Amino acid sequence: MSITMHDVAARAGVSIKTVSNVVNDYPHVSEATRSKVERAIAELGYRPNLSARSLRSGRSGVISLIIPDLRNAYFAELADAVMRQARARGLSVLIEQVAGGRDVELEILRGPRMQLVDGILYSPLSLDRDDSALLPDGPMVILGEQLFDGDRDHVTMANVDGARAATEHLLAQGRRHIVALGTDPHDTLGPAALRLQGYREALEAAGIPADPAYVSTVVSWHRSDGANAMREVIAAGLPFDGVVAFNDAMALGAMRVLQDAGLRIPDDVAIIGFDDLDETRYALPTLSTVDIGREEIAERAVELLIERIAAPGQPEAPRAIVSGFRVVPRESTGSVIAHTPRSRTAPSTL
Amino acid sequence: MATTLHDVAKLAGVSAKTVSNVVNDYPHIKQATKERVLAAIAELGYRPNLSARGLRSGRSGVISLIIPDLRNSYFAELADAVMHAADQLGLSVLIELSGGDRAREAELLRGARLRAVDGVLYSALHLGDEDLAVVEEVTIPMVLLGERMFNAPNDHVTMRNTEGARAATEHLIALGRTRIVAFGAHRADIVGSASLRLAGYRAALEAAGMVFDPALVREVPVWGRFDGAVAMRAMLDEGVAFDGIVAFNDALALGAMRVLSERGVAMPDEVAVIGFDDIDEGRYSLPSLSTIAPGREQIARTAVSLLVERIAGGVDDVPPRRVYADFELVRRESTASSPVGADSPSPDVS
């Protein structure tokens, strides 16, 4: 007969709960207790596995984070924040990347591995409302807009208002020919569409007619996409004096191309990004951006998921949380603060 | 019936061992042989199906990747590469962060068998050969990454730290630089990438008949942009004279470059800078950053396939293997005599 957690508890002289705490690697177990339990586990050859453990206790102590890709610095910094928040609550994180198209995304969401985790934090890339029925059952918090029907909580950022504030920041400096960099014609509900909406609202409020020629389309949101899009805008020969890039990575790629083309930032072209990545503080010039509350998003998302895991289906109504945001003016839009940080601005774990 | 390794070997006219070498992406395979094997794999639709095997054997299909931090772009890009390599083999990856904390590094290792993953890829910042006891306790398959443990009873995939740093230093020497800073040393360290890279720097100076000047060795305990900026500001304030910088990673170099720009130091004319890691950011910085590409993709693929072999079993009699990835000197503007423009989008950036 196989060894159970009861056997381990009996051998170690502790409660089953304590064995479970050790197995799940929760903090706040004393070192002495931990080694006692580990010794009993070793002596008995007890070996829980993700699936067996979840069958027995209903919990694996693991949540899944499904994101487009870690190569995108926004998701790397988000994943880092989610993992710190999860760890503070005794949870491990299984990261899955879905930057392979709709089929990959569905395969991962509906695959056997999702049965092994207690809950899922999901940042959708290709799926939308029409796919609601395809989502797996079980605790899930969506990182992003309310794209799906049903009782899915979601935690999102102020995409429309943030992009509007970024655009208004350029307008306030007298910029009138502002390029929107990073739209995606396939994205009608997601961040690209919402940030475009914010850009349009700002122009409209300022009485500037929206000119589709100033809206630049990209394939994905990496530095190389921003660089390519900026090259196309320059090649098209449109006069422009401002750029609202829909994320920092694209803005950084675009800045480099602007400077290669002999355009001065911010004198000839002011540029602002979105995300407040660490590297924006060290770019030349430093990049103005929108801080979208990444830590807050990570913390609230993990909290909501833990609540859903503890009490599935309660509350019935989906909850919607929008993180706070602020415009961070730096050199790329003419801020005179021209120095690298004197103190750490991001949590450093190293 | 499913295609086997032997079918591929037969069609390609090579041994099964050679097919395995190609699948595992080992270096030193003739290009022609490699192409023949890859053609046979494509023709037969061969795909090593480990998840099916895993389900049969009760494996979880999950491997764990233990790294210091995702905020460090090198590790984010490595994690991305590991996940792609794992996905090819039907595995998912549980990423765990040690935060560069020594106790946490040991704790994660001790917990590995409890989390019931099939195997572990482990990159330590602090544990070294003196901690072999902790490593030996790990009873599930484990492959070590990085450069701290050279005597562990495990397969080990690492990069050519010393040779890479030597090539970087020689590159600056070839440009006629005579006062070259070693940027990012850890004096207390006798193992680890900092000491190996410092050894490469010294070897290059020595080979060129240049005097090693301890005043040009700069200690930077943490390898982030912020830390590079702080250390560079201090060097300039102290009035140390130098005309070249071998930064021990790209993040340090990018932080330092920003400060040099703020102080009006022309790069590369007055100071030539080279980093280490080849992170995407360095392609778009101003100036774009010369660097050592340490073979990240190869490290990821090799580490995953070595681990998968150990998980699959049947290689218990194979002694621990050590694989060094091939490195490459990447010349960009920070060490060039004329601007070369931003990199074209690289095909591996999706």
Image: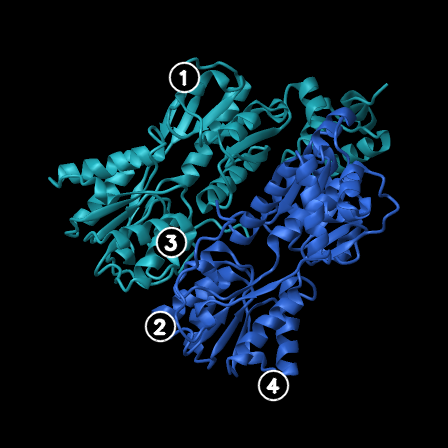
Question: Which mark, residue A149?
Answer: 1
Residue that lies at the very extreme toward the left in this rendered image? A207
Q: Is residue A73 left or right of residue B4?
A: left
Q: Amino acid at mark 4?
A: Val
Q: Which x, y percent locates residue B325?
A: 67, 58
Contact between marks 2 and 1 (CB within 8 A): the answer is no
Q: Share a chain, discs 1 and 4? A: no
Q: CA distance from mark 1 to mark 3?
A: 36 Å
Crowd class of label 3 (few under 14; some 14 to 19; many from 20; radius 10 Å)? many
Q: Is residue B185 above or below residue A103?
A: below
Q: Amino acid at mark 1?
A: Asp
Q: Nearer the viewer, mark 2 or mark 3?
A: 3
Q: Share a chain, discs 2 and 3? A: no
Residue placed most toward the observer, B40 or B208 = B40
Q: Which x, y percent locates residue B140?
A: 78, 39
Residue under pointer 2? B263
Q: Earlier in the sequence, mark 4 or mark 2?
A: 4
Q: Nearer the viewer, mark 1 or mark 3?
A: 3
Residue under pointer 3? A253
**Dot 3: what SS?**
helix
Contact between marks 1 and 4 (CB within 8 A): the answer is no
Give the chain letter at badge 2: B
Q: Share a chain, discs 4 and 2? A: yes
Give the chain letter at badge 3: A
Q: Which x, y percent locates residue A151?
A: 44, 16
Residue placed most toward the observer, A292 or B16 = B16
Q: CA distance from mark 4 to mark 2?
A: 28 Å
Crowd class of label 1 (few under 14; some 14 to 19; many from 20; radius 10 Å)? few
* Residue A128 visible in image: yes
Which residue corresponds to the image point at 28% horizontal and 34% vertical from the top-left?
Answer: A160
Q: Which x, y percent locates residue B343?
A: 43, 59
Q: Quadrant of residue B115?
A: top right
